[in-house]
Image: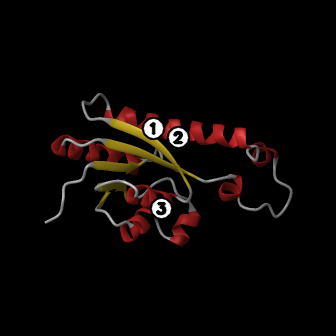
Amino acid sequence: MSRQPKILIVPVDGSEGASAAAEYALGLAQALDVPVRLLYAFPRDPVDMFGIPTEAPGPEELEYFSPEAFERLRDQSAEKAFAATREVLGETAVEIQEQIVSGHPAEAIVAHAAAEDQPQVVMGSRGLSGFKEFLLGSVSQRVLHQADCPVTVVR
């Protein structure tokens, strides 16, 4: 018999898929009386985000190579995703937590879930990923196959 989760981890990126997953997780959290943690994954550093420049970086890329500017970009991006999700969820008695993690989204989500006691990941089937994700496989598919905890993918 499987155990009930103690926390629902919901990766968010501001996409419709993440919003649908958050709405689903909210209903589940109410039924199970557990908190929801909104999780935002962001690259570790500018090289992870932009790659190693093969030519002189443009002014926009160069700006974010400073640690302070990169942190500001991370925080602003996370706040946009959290705000979009909070708007969808509205007022609720469920405890809603927010956390930023660093690294490739799938790896960061799996590592974060592995550090929790009895988590369940609830995520959208499609996010804001680009062509690179199409080639490498979707984040939800990678989490589904790599996580050691239950994973619910919401369409």
Name the one closer to the observer, 102 or 14: 102
Dot 2 corresponds to which residue? 78
In which quadrant is the N terminus drawn? bottom left
The image quadrant of residue 29 is: top left
Residue 99's place in the image compared with 51, above or below, is: above
Badge 1 amino acid: Phe
Q: In this view, does 17 lie to the left or right of 69?
A: left
Measuring 71% from the left and 57% from the top, which residue is drawn there?
47
Dot 1 corresponds to which residue? 82
Crowding at mark 2 (Cα within 10 Å: few <14, some 14-19, many 20+): many
In which quadrant is the C terminus drawn? bottom left
Label disc, if present, on residue 106 of the rendered structure:
3
Measuring 34% from the left and 67% from the top, which residue is drawn there?
148
In the image, farthest residue toward the top: 91
Q: Which coloring applies here?
A: secondary structure
Question: Marks 1 and 2: in contact by CB < 8 Å?
Answer: yes
Q: In this view, does 46 lie to the left or right of 118?
A: right
Badge 3 amino acid: Ala
